[in-house]
Every structure is written in structure tokens, then in C-alpha cells.
Amino acid sequence: MNRIGIFVFYDAGGIVDNYIEILLDSLSEILKKLIIIVNGKINPLGYHKFKKYTKDIFVRDNYGYDAGAYKDVFLKFLSYEDWKNWDEIVLFNDTFYAPIYPWEPIFKQMEAKKSDFWGLSRHPECRSVNNTNINIPSHIQAYFLVCKKSMFLSNYWLEFWNNLDFPKIHQEAIKNFEIDFSVFFSKKGFTGIALTDTYQIKMNCEKNPYASYSYELIKYGKFPIIKRKAIMLYYFAEAKRAICYIKSETSYDINYIILHLERLIKEKKINVLEPFDQDKLEIFYRTHKNIYIYGHGQYGKGMATYFEYRKWKYKAFIVTQNTENNADLLVYKDIHFEKEDGVILALCEAAFTEVYPKIKGELDESQLYYPDYSLKN
């Protein structure tokens, strides 16, 4: 297979971390040529690292996200490329850690499928979180896409890129590129498949698979990557299981993940506790005697996992009603809170909107720490 890879890189400081070198090293056996697109800037050391892999490094202004970078590749940077020389184009970015498992068996497996393009995971059709009147169509997620000659040599290929508007915000990047890519080419008669489509793993049909099921995908499906977005508060409990499994059962060094995330956290380039503010949470913890975590869903369990990571202690989980009949859960109305106690409302937006108005008059505002949903992307 003659494969050409197009890698989109972005870092606010232009720093190329070790996990990226491991990723590019691993794909060197799969790709015969690599193109690197830098969105924004790259420092001299990072540029030197990239030169190990290719002389084709294009630095562009950071606009249009990945979609803008790919559009510039096909319509400007590589307009001279004879695409007939290539069997597959691999589009990928720096938002994941890999390879947890080798690439070659996956490429061989997917090569045997009768499809025109494929990816690692598929987002199921579902209702939009922000607007329940909008359907999000099923689509192959765009952090890793492999496109075959039948597709990129067709007239529809340049039609898609010519008509793609440069996204201005993150939501537009998802709509204009990630979703519309699958929708557009499927309507034109091309067939797309995801690696997760081949799994016999039971998953909720409306959940993002790479984040909600990172442990199951890696353990039972030998999924080759873990997304950075999967290591966020809402998915912490699942991510912890995944990271522990990677550490104990695979050869991938999790220090690549840890060092990258710790740098981003230290530089305040990422907030793994979104929609909570990390600094304010630490102050809240240090200034209260007993901490209760209100909520036992994914946010509550995620918060408990974060506490475990920080070696912090919390008194108990509390809920409005103990419908689970779980002895470890305390019912809010049955608790006598002291003035030194603090309550973290680790709730999804809908539950927070319901719970907060009921308790804000019963406890002093200084005793409450709650999410700021305006922080969400």
C-alpha cells in the first residue's frame, strides 16, 4: 500500500512532546510519505524533531482548525501532488496517544473491508446536548481518517474541500468537517466504516465511544489509542481503568500521557476538570473541614477519582434520594452540616439546574462549590 499521511499539529507554545514522536515513529512503517501541517507556531526544537520524519512541513496561521489545515493542503500546499501515485491518504492529528497496540494488524483488517474510507471510532446518531431539537447524524470521527483512491480521485473530493467553510469556533469545526465529511460522502455513494463497528462490545447507542468506553475498547477490542478528551472529569472513572490497564497490560509507556497532561495543566492550557475551575476547587478543599460530593453519576464518580489522584479526602457522596439503596450514599436532607463543611455539586447541567435552587438558601454560599457551565467548549 502506498500511503501518504497528513498530520495536523497544534500547541499554543509550539512544543512537540514525546508522545508525538512515539506516534510518528509508529506510523513510519505504515506511511511512505508524511506531510506535517503546523497550525500556529512551532519552536526550533520542535521543528528539528519534525525534520526527522519529513521535509514537507507547512506552518500556517491557526485558523480553521484541522479542517482549515486539510483544506489548505489539498487546495494550496499540495496542489501539485499527483494523487494517482497514492492508494490511501491518512488524515490524523495530535489529540490522542498511540499506539497502545500495533497499527499494522488494524490496517490489514480495515483494508479487507469493502469501504471507501474508514476511521477508528464512530459517533452514533443522537440528540444534540445543547439543543434537543437537533439530530447529530452518525459519523466517523475525524481525528484519524483513512481515505482510499476511489474517494480522493473522484470529482467529489475537491468539491467537498472547495465548499468547506473555514470553521471559526470548535462547534463549527465539528459540524463543517467531522460530521459533514461522513454525511457528504455517504450521500455521494461512498461507504465509510469505523473500527468500532467491527467490535462485539455492548455500548450505549447515544454515547461517544472513545470517551465513554475507553477501558472496554482498549481491553476487549485492542483499540490502538486513547483520546486526550477521554481523560476529563466526566470520564475520569473510565479513564482511570483504561490508564491502569495500559500500564499493566501493554507496552505503551503512560508517562508520555502523564507528562504531556501535566505540562498543559501547569501552563493552564487545558482544564481536565471542566466545567470546574481547578484553582478554585483546590482553595475550596483547603478551606473546609469536611467535603461532601453531591452526586453519584459520572461527574460525582469522576470527582472522587480526581480526589484519589490528588490524595484528598472526602466525607461521603450525597444524593437527593437514595434510589440505588446504596449504603455508601447519604441523603442530603438527613445530614446536619457544620459551618466548616463544604459541598461540591458534581452534577450534570440539567441536574445542577434542578438541585442548586433548592439548597442555595439552606447552606451558606461559601459552603458550596459548583460547576460553571460557561467553561464548557
Image (cartoon, rainbow, N blue to C red):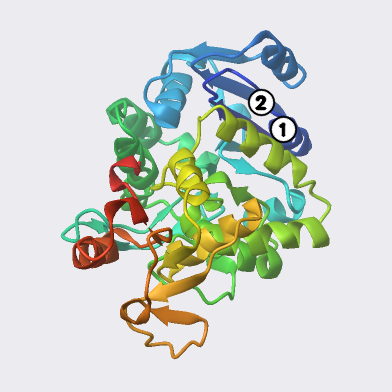
- Mark 2 = which residue? 34
Answer yes or no: do the residues labelled 1 and 2 have beta carbons within 8 Å? yes
**99 vs 370, nearest the viewer:** 370
Q: Amino acid at mark 2?
A: Leu
Q: Secondary structure at mark 2?
A: strand
Whether residue 204 is situated above or below residue 149 in the rendered picture: below
- Mark 1 = which residue? 24
Tally of numbered tags: 2
Residue projecting furthest to the front: 339
Can residue 264 be seen in the rendering of this structure? yes
- The percent coordinates of residue 220 (x first, y second) are 68, 70
Q: Amino acid at mark 1?
A: Leu
Residue projecting furthest to the bottom: 325
Which quarter of the rendering shows the C terminus?
top left
Q: Secondary structure at mark 1?
A: helix
Whether residue 132 is situated above or below residue 174 in the rendered picture: below
- The percent coordinates of residue 21 (x first, y second) are 74, 30
